[in-house]
Amino acid sequence: MDPLVIILTIVICIFAVVLVVAGIQVILVLQEIKTTLRKVNVAAESLEKAANSALMPLANLGGTMEGIKGGLKIVQAFTSWLNKEKNRE
């Protein structure tokens, strides 16, 4: 056999082994990224639940304020009606 063919065969075999090792490393890195993203997702969900539980009373407070504003408008309308009745007399 020609020495060039032997050298090319050895180089191709070494290159194939290196590519297999690199492929295995890529697969392992992708698995690590997958587990890390799962942990980040769990943390984000727990943070979202905590934020929602913290902000829910504030949303209810906004509804309460709207109710108080409506009540004050009713009181104001009633007092203006009473003032009109006083002015008629």
Image (cartoon, rainbow, N blue to C red):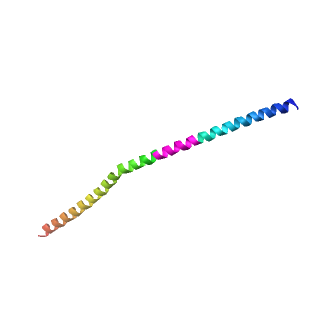
**Depth check, front residue: 53 or 29:** 29
Q: From this viewpoint, which residue is outermost toward the bottom?
A: 89
Q: Is residue 32 magenta?
A: yes
**Left or right of residue 49, residue 73 in this image:** left
**Left or right of residue 62, residue 75 in this image:** left
Kindly indicate the quadrant of the structure image that contains residue 80.
bottom left
Above or below, 36 against 59 in this view is above
Residue 85 in the image: x percent, y percent? Answer: 15, 69
Which stretch did the figure color magenta? 31-42
Q: From this viewpoint, which residue is outermost toward the right?
A: 1
**Depth check, front residue: 60 or 85:** 60
Kindly indicate the quadrant of the structure image that contains residue 70.
bottom left
Q: From this viewpoint, which residue is outermost toward the top?
A: 3
Residue 87 in the image: x percent, y percent? Answer: 14, 67
Identity of the residue drawn at 58% across and 42% down: 31
Identity of the residue drawn at 13% across and 67% down: 86
**Left or right of residue 41, residue 80 in this image:** left
Residue 57 in the image: x percent, y percent? Answer: 32, 52
Q: Is residue 9 magenta?
A: no
Count numbered badges in the picture: 0
Identity of the residue drawn at 23% across and 63% down: 74
Above or below, 39 against 60 in this view is above
**Depth check, front residue: 3 or 44:** 3
Q: In what quadrant of the picture does the N terminus appear?
A: top right
Above or below, 59 against 26 in this view is below
Identity of the residue drawn at 28% across and 57% down: 64
